Amino acid sequence: MKQFLAFVRKEFYHVFRDRKTLLLLFGMPIAQIILFGFALTNEIKNTKIVICDNSNDIATRAIIDKLEVSKNFEIEQVFLNNNEIEETFKKGKVKLVIVFPPNFNHSLNHENKAQVQIIADASDPNTANTLTMYATSIIGDYHKELMAGRKIPLQIETEMRMIYNPELKGATNFVPGVMALVLFLVSVLMTSVSIVREKESGTMEVLLVSPFNAVLVVISKAIPYFFLSIINLIVILVLSVTLLDMTIKGSVILLFLESALLIITALSLGLLISNSTASQQTAMIISLMGMLLPTVLFTGFMFPLENMPLVLQVISNIIPAKWYYIIVKSIMIKGLGFSAIWKETLILMGMTLFLLIVSIKKFKVRLS
Amino acid sequence: MRTLIFLLQKEFRQIFRDKTILRLIIAMPIIQLLVMPLAADYEIKNINISIVDHDRSAFSQKLVSKIVASGYFKLADYGNSFEEGFRLMEKNKADLVLEIPADFEKQIIRENTQKLFVAVNAINGTKAMVGSTYLGNIISDFNQNLRTEILPPSKTSNSPQIEIVSSNWFNRFLNYPVFMVPGILVILVSMVGAFMCALNIVKEKEVGTIEQINVTPIRKHHFILGKLIPFWIIGMFVFSIGLFLVSRVVYGIVPEGSILVLYSFLSIYLLAVLGLGLIISTYSNTQQQAMSLAFFFMMIFVLMGGLFTSVDSMPEWSQWIARLNPVTYFIEVMRMVIMKGSGFNEIKNHMIIITGFAIFFNTWAIINYKKTS
């Protein structure tokens, strides 16, 4: 035990002496949570649209007014030749064009039918889809007002209620994702170089000739980073509640324990990478270049996992951050208790155990 | 000039000697480019719906089969209690719960109006909106059919209708890979360039070999160029494999615009990101520090460059940050050229800005690189 504590103390010295890394270690998560918490959103606001109004009558003006009031759109220009549409799209700023044919109001009232054309720049399919939907529903609103006086037979009304996130805020979805991402990646990154650095600088040899216990050396590497990550976790939680307006509906203690579990999983993964590589560069390439995009995508906060091809859905199961993301959503947003997340917790525990055992097995007592 | 050639020789030898790293920096981007775009798909297909049917009439059955037949929804449960449906939503087994009230059929005929209730899991706002809009459309379709079936034709056809015709330009079938592959390629090329360049110099610092270079009459800009050029070539190489092999052959993406435009932008862009890598390296003493800094920038590259979420919908201040991110410009240019066929004229501003970045970053790096420690 005394030996172990001595090792832990040595590791703490390592960490605290490198002031720059320490500063980054604390500064980064704070900056990232604030930055991404606000910036990441799928809500589409203030998109520039162009309207070609070839009739300019009461009906089209009423619809344009409605579009103008909506916070989703910003009307750029009202008159445009049809040929200029493609040119406008190519410049990249305008995402949607709405074309009213001549005599819109006249056909609406006398022929009972009028046409509107919505042209979307679908080079971004998601934005195109969403904007078309917004515009359609605004025109639909106008139509409804028009019909308000008349009695429609056999009307089915639908009451939609948005549960958990009534204002459809982006943060509700993204903040837990960013939490998972930052906590997980920072912990993996820091430990992934810890052992291999000693190999590279040659100090490992000193450790190897001393009468130490291999398991203790490996574990003591992770301990300072565990404490630092716990502090990061507290900061992240405080920031998301105070600054990003997230509420923790469920138990804070449970959330804390589950987060600690994720940190341990990440640290074990970092240790495994560090034990299996020969140079710091290789370790970093794997833990940074190799893991960044997969973690972002397979956690499931950017793109719904159930849309992915089955093979990728299976692959996503090995990403610890995915399980943590489910856990965080359940506790913070849905307010569920442990009974709802025991399965995910068990999976994370299993992963941690597996990673730890493998990385201790991989630790070589010989230099080459 | 001769100094530079010797330096380049040294760099290339070092790079080619470490086979593990060389393999990693070529293979990793390619594998990710093959797999990741498949995961980045927002086309929402399998929305799980749980239907609570208190009516069990011919009408309600018809509505249910219409919803299932639409192809957007998967029936997760067809039950009798709303609580049961809601529990499925808590467990993530259902995204929507539709409740059909008792006497749905009777009421609609007798009272002319009836109400359906839908609960939507709105944690993911976009998904919730898409799901509820689809469902709303299906219900109003069903409603319209009901009218034409039951009412005499005179009563249905005399109300004014607005017909909305929508068309999607540049990407008619809302194909996701066409949108994602160019963006992901940009990220991967930037990672390889900036990150490897930064690590390379810091490694010389950590191992101590930089001392040997510092005591020689090699000029600062020679040293910097010697580090820049190899990674510039690697970046070009990785990009070309990604563009011609993966995106062309595997995903079948044929750029609408000119390849020349892409490559001229890429050549300046790479100078800019490599410059950023150099700056990182001048500020760090150990590889761990360089990595932490690189990680910070990578995250900003990936999440704030408009790859996954659009820059235009960010709040004003974070749009400014996105504008300070070179990746944003290249992703925009890639998408404009590949999907819309924009030419030099349309990307003129992007070109000027990225040249500015390249000059700024590299000057900063050269000034900040000190031969004495």
Image (cartoon, coloured by chain):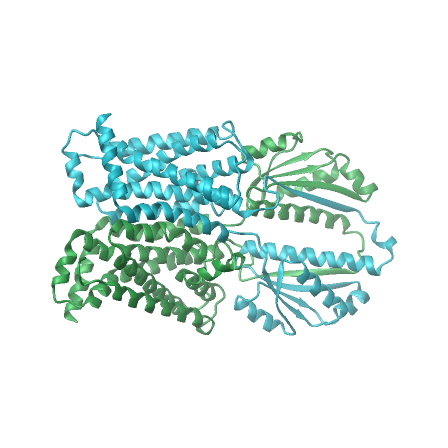
In the rendered structure, the answer to whether residue B144 lies left or right of residue A197 reads right
Number of numbered callouts drawn:
0
Residue A365 falls in image quadrant: bottom left
In the rendered structure, the answer to whether residue A290 lies left or right of residue A142 reads left
Going 45% across and 32% down the picture, which residue do you hit?
B350
In the rendered structure, the answer to whether residue B205 lies left or right of residue A319 reads left
In the rendered structure, the answer to whether residue A231 lies left or right of residue B101 reads left
Name the residue furthest top. B1
| x and y, in percent, of residue A268 in the image | 30, 63
> In the rendering, what colour is chain B?
cyan
Specify the quadrant that holds the C terminus of chain B.
top left
Q: Can residue B372 be seen?
A: no
Specify the quadrant that holds the N terminus of chain B.
top left
- Taking depth in this image into account, of B338 and B249 the one nearest to the observer is B249
In the image, is residue A242 above or below residue B165?
below
In the image, is residue B144 above or below residue B358?
below
Going 25% across and 37% down the picture, which residue do you hit?
B11
| x and y, in percent, of residue B288 in the image | 25, 50
| x and y, in percent, of residue B130 in the image | 60, 54
| x and y, in percent, of residue B256 in the image | 54, 35
In the image, is residue A235 above or below residue A138?
below
Q: Which chain is green?
A: A
Residue A177 falls in image quadrant: bottom left
Q: Can residue B119 be seen?
A: yes
